[in-house]
Amino acid sequence: GGSKISKPIEFPAELKLPLSDGRICVYTLTGIVIHVGGSASSGHYTAYVKRPGTNGKTQWYHMDDSFVEAVSEKTVLRQRDAYVLFYCRKEVKLEFTTPVPRGSMSASEAKQFGENRARARANSMTSDNGTPESPASSTSMKKPSKSS
């Protein structure tokens, strides 16, 4: 059997993690599993679970075999032998950016814009000597010469 890691841990009732777009994603603690015992291969497990209530009111319970007891969130957060933590993500508000208003283009301006874009793209695909690169020319292999 293995040895149990017995380093006490701290954990928050709410985790606030940043998303790549700058928004914050909030996770709420909903349960923990506690392992009581001296080794990884023996001991006793209990759990603390959060029961959602009406009007946003919740209640924590400590479950120990057939014994169930209502406890405070403060009691839950004081547990240092947590083995597994369960968090539930709160809804992330969808935010859509407002498009930047652009003035309308005339037909001739749109044509010029398209031509400039095509020219820029063509220029980005030319070789150093100004000639267009073909896939074959950039990957061709020369036949090795025989040396005697």
Image (cartoon, grey):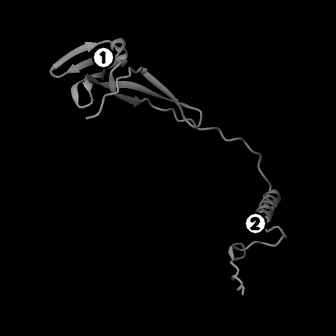
Q: Quadrant of residue 100?
A: top right
Instruction: Tell me residue 42's x, y (percent).
Output: 21, 28
The residue shown at (75%, 72%) is 133
Which residue carries the number 1 mark? 59
Q: Amino acid at mark 2?
A: Met
Instruction: Give the label, 2 or 1, closer to the camera.
Output: 2
The quarter of the displayed image where residue 36 is located: top left
State left or right for residue 83 relative to residue 104. Answer: left
Pointer 1 local density, CA inside 10 Å: few below 14, some 14–19, many at least 20: few
- Left or right placement of residue 86 versus residue 46 in this view: right
Residue sitting at x 78%, y 58%:
110
* Looking at the image, residue 127 lies above or below residue 22: below
Q: Residue furthest right?
A: 129
Report the disc number at residue 125. 2
Between 29 and 100, the one nearer to me in the picture? 29
Q: Nearer the viewer, residue 78 or 125?
A: 78
As drawn, which residue projects farthest toward the left?
66
Residue 9: quarter of image: top left
Q: 25 or 66, which lies in front?
A: 66
As helix, strand or loop, the secondary structure at mark 2 comes to loop
Q: CA distance from mark 2 to mark 1?
A: 65 Å
Q: Callout 1, which amino acid?
A: Gln
Answer with mark 2 or mark 1, whichever residue precedes in sequence. 1
